Amino acid sequence: MSANRPEQSESLFNVTPTRRRTYAIAFTLFSLIGYGVVIWLHVAGGMAAVNVASPSDEVGAAAMAWSIMFGFAIAHAAAFGLALVSAEIAGGTMVIADYLRIKLVVPVQERLRNEGRAEGREEGRAQANRSWREWNLRRREAEARGESFDEPEPYGEDE
């Protein structure tokens, strides 16, 4: 680590820069859903649905406000956790995918590449042998006819 730069520590709840957009979108979405549920519970069912009453067992404006604020706080905390999990699922998926690629795909690719090299070497060797046999056959036929044979050797210095 550079002496000029202070050490950067990371929080347990740190969202990496590549996942910030995912986190922000998920956090906003989960927050809005949570707030909607809180409001729906208070509007649709009233205070009886959320079991909130003042100390004198009366349902008042302050108790309603307190209940809504408490519900928003819980929705906000839940949105934080769900958004963090959602953002990290993408990273976890990539880690698992990379692990599987290294353990499964790369060995298969290497095996196929090595098999291809071996087949290529065999084909190249067979082609070279075929070229030499054909050249030698033409040389022998020329000698048998008493002709001069000045064809260069296959894979000689000229080629």
Image (spheres, helix red, strand yellow):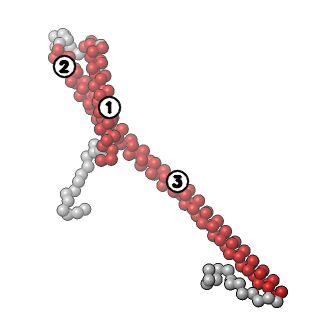
Mark 3–mark 1 Cα distance, whole angstroms, equals 37 Å
Instruction: Assign a secondary structure to mark 2.
Output: helix
Q: How many numbered marks, from 0 up?
A: 3
Q: Quadrant of residue 72?
A: top left
Q: Would residue 130 be visible to someone looking at this image?
A: yes
83 left or right of 111?
left
Residue topped by disc 2:
65
The type of residue carrying mark 3 is Val
The type of residue carrying mark 1 is Leu
Instruction: Assign a secondary structure to mark 1.
Output: helix
Q: Quadrant of residue 85?
A: top left
Q: Depth check: give the residue in front, 77 or 30.
A: 30
Residue topped by disc 1:
29
The residue sitting at 25% across, 46% down in the picture is: 11
The residue sitting at 31% across, 22% down in the picture is: 37
The type of residue carrying mark 2 is Ala
Tag in front: 1 or 2: 1
Residue 105 image label:
3
Residue 53's spot in the image, x, y percent? Answer: 20, 14
Asked whether disc 3 touches disc 2, contact meaning CB atoms under 8 Å apart, the reply is no
Mark 3–mark 2 Cα distance, whole angstroms, equals 58 Å
Instruction: Assign a secondary structure to mark 3.
Output: helix
The residue sitting at 27% across, 20% down in the picture is: 39
Residue 142's spot in the image, x, y percent? Answer: 79, 85
